[in-house]
Image: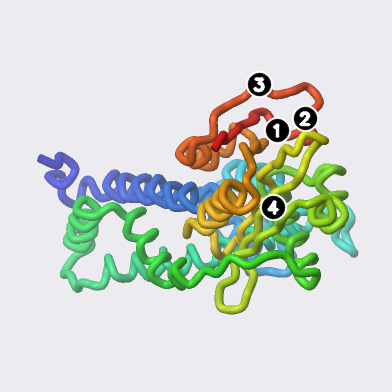
Amino acid sequence: MDALRGYGELGLGSRLKRVSEYMMRETQLVYNYFNIDFDPYLFPIFKIITNKKGVTNSEIQSSLQFSQPAITQALNKLNLKGLIVYKNDDLDKRKKIIFLSKKGQQMLNTLKPIWKSIDLVIKDYTLEASSSLIEHLNTLENKLNTTSFSDTIIHHIKMNNTTTQDIEIITYQNKYAQTFYDLNIEWLQTYFYVEAYDEEVLSQPEKYIINKGGHIFFALLNNKIVGTVALMPIGDEGLFELTKMAVSPNHRGFKIGQQLMQHCIDFAKNTIGLPKLILYSNRKLENAIYIYRKYGFIELPLEPDTPYKRSDIKMELVF
């Protein structure tokens, strides 16, 4: 028996808190599923900042009526994630104006379709009429207990996107050089940072990949490039690295990266006859590491002179 339901109106505050915590956890699962590094508890303050062209701390407090410590804590987290920037007011240098950073704008573009699906799912969950708030809450919790909120949202997002069956894998053309650069830079800025080696290779893909016998592939959807990956020669022993994989923020979570990786594996094994592939990654990308292992990659000792500072794991797939 649900004790809180038995308390009737006396338990309203506790029940609202329970629903809130449940939905926050489920929303976090949605973000995690689509590899979005965002905390649902930051949503109200982040949304206020996205709605205004510059906002002060006091304006946020007035709009949300949150406590000042809660706002300060959220702003500190947003700042640490690089999603906001502070600028001095033109008239009062003591006043700080808060804006979205470039990374924050990218995050907003990534989150918008997620928020749209969340909004529609919640509306669907709360459409039924009721005679009291408690009755409405009973209906909502019944639905939440019957069907996973996060699963429903994920399914909704997928159903509102073109199926991956329409993805076409194409080879490199010079006209796609900028797209190759942009996709990878966005991914690096979202999850890590751009190293000098990244900038050098990504800005000259023909010099460092194509002209050395390497290959670059793109995922094409509705005549638009939505993902990329490369097979890059390294060293003088005929070794190839599976690298530079990136998917457009609006198309993550639909296994486009896995399609690109499978294409690379098939191409390396069956078309050019490579004996193996290697890759470098970072252990914080738990979902990616899981997928690499699923495809047969095994961990190798990481050499001290790895080309990427962010790499803390090296993996190999032997055919």
Q: Nearer the viewer, mark 4 or mark 1?
A: 4
Q: Nearer the viewer, residue 308 or 194?
A: 308
Q: Which residue is mark 3?
A: 301
Q: Which label belongs to residue 230?
A: 4
Residue 200 image offset from top left, x and y in percent: 87, 49
What's the distance in space between the residues labelled 2 and 3, CA to CA? 11 Å
Residue at the location (21% across, 58% down)? 143
3 and 1 marks in contact (CB < 8 Å): no
Pointer 4 or 1: first along the chain = 4
Q: Amino acid at mark 1?
A: Ser
Q: Nearer the viewer, residue 179 or 4?
A: 179
Q: Which residue is mark 2?
A: 306
Pointer 3 or 1: first along the chain = 3
Give the answer, above or below, for where 197 lies relative to 146: above
Q: Is residue 42 visible?
A: no
2 and 1 marks in contact (CB < 8 Å): yes
Q: Nearer the viewer, mark 2 or mark 1?
A: 2
What's the distance in space between the residues labelled 3 and 1, CA to CA? 12 Å
